[in-house]
Amino acid sequence: MKKRILTGDRPTGQLHLGHYVGSLKNRVELQNKHEQFVMIADAQALTDNYDHPEKVRSNIMEVLLDYLAIGIDPSKSTIFIQSQVPQLFELTFYLLNMVTYNRLKHNPTVKAEMQQKGMEDTVTAGFMIYPVSQAADITLFSAELVPVGADQAPILEQTNEIVRRFNSVYHTDVLKEAQPLFSDCPRLVGPDGKAKMSKSLGNAITFSASFKEIEETVKKMYTDPEHLRVQDPGKIEGNVVFMYLDAFDPDKIRVQELKEHYQRGGLGDMTIKRHLMQVLEELIGPIRERRHQFKQQTSMVVDVLHEGTLNAKKEGARKLDEIKEAMKISYRLQNLTPFFSV
């Protein structure tokens, strides 16, 4: 039987190459082997963008266009909007009783994001409980596999803790533990080599980037600061251009040859940068064109999201009925007296 996957992204901007190597490439391949639910996590995005809902709303379509252009097929993957599946929020409320506030406060992923966003003293309750919200996302759709980056692993660990606690309290096996799916390249550094590629840091290469934008970004990439002359031997450790070639150039033999040539000297930085520009254009160019074509078919794209969300709601309603039955709160309001006498 096919295993079920739950994955998704926050609609706070267009997706980029960091998402591609971290998860998107895998999703395209996995949808042929598994049953995949892909969530546009607008409710989660509101936990730190609640005062700018227009930012979240406007990017739902941008993320959807990226999905379709990359090759996520709505006939194989269910694409849906998180906020339009009310069962997720009801389940989140029940699961909150399965975890202590102290445990949430010490989740490494939450602590790191609070520090990164400078919100240690202003964190909202909604942001603090988002690991529980993610546990609801995963368990409502009975996901067995969840593609994650290494920095998100503590979220999945906490999800499985909540699952075990819930099943123990209610003497059931209605909730299933999930396993992480790690990418071969879970973290893509930014062009300066100092931080990961990120929308918020403004160092991302998106799937709508023109060749000129790719060219400008690659020209600024960090290489070997001691490689001052073409004939000098160069270092590939920490060299961002070679990191990107490892991640995106399908010709691994060619990459190895370039590395050896660079290390012995005689290969200039601009030569390898031009090669990288071409490699990225060969990847992004077709995606950019498909994205443009989908953007001209608004009604079809909206239908994809509408149909996927309806399917997700049906699945959510079915699973929540099972969960409430296990909790013994599946009240039969049309016949209360015999129910409460049991």
Image (cartoon, helix red, strand yellow):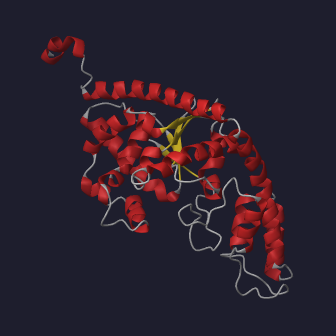
Which residue is at 28% across, 48% downward? 99
Dividing the picture into quadrants, the one containing residue 142 is: top left
Q: Is residue 74 visible?
A: no
Residue 61, x across and y down, in percent: 58, 43
Q: How many marks?
A: 0
Dividing the picture into quadrants, the one containing residue 238 is: bottom right
| Position above or below: 275 against 183 | below
Q: From the viewer's perspective, is 168 left or right of 113?
A: left
Residue 151, x across and y down, in percent: 48, 59
Report the front residue among 78 and 12.
Answer: 12
Which residue is at 69% across, 45% downward? 70
Residue 102, x across and y down, in percent: 25, 57
Which residue is at 60% across, 54% downward? 19
Question: Dividing the image into 4 quarters, which one contains the C terminus?
Answer: top left
Q: From the viewer's perspective, is 176 left or right of 65?
A: left
Which residue is at 70% across, 68% downward? 217
| Position above or below: 29 against 183 | above
| Position above or below: 286 against 77 | below
| Position above or below: 234 against 114 | below
Residue projecting furthest to the left: 341
Report the front residue among 228 and 211.
Answer: 211
Q: Is residue 52 visible?
A: yes
Report the front residue among 272 and 201.
Answer: 201
Question: Dividing the image into 4 quarters, which one contains the N terminus?
Answer: top right
Residue 120, x across and y down, in percent: 33, 66
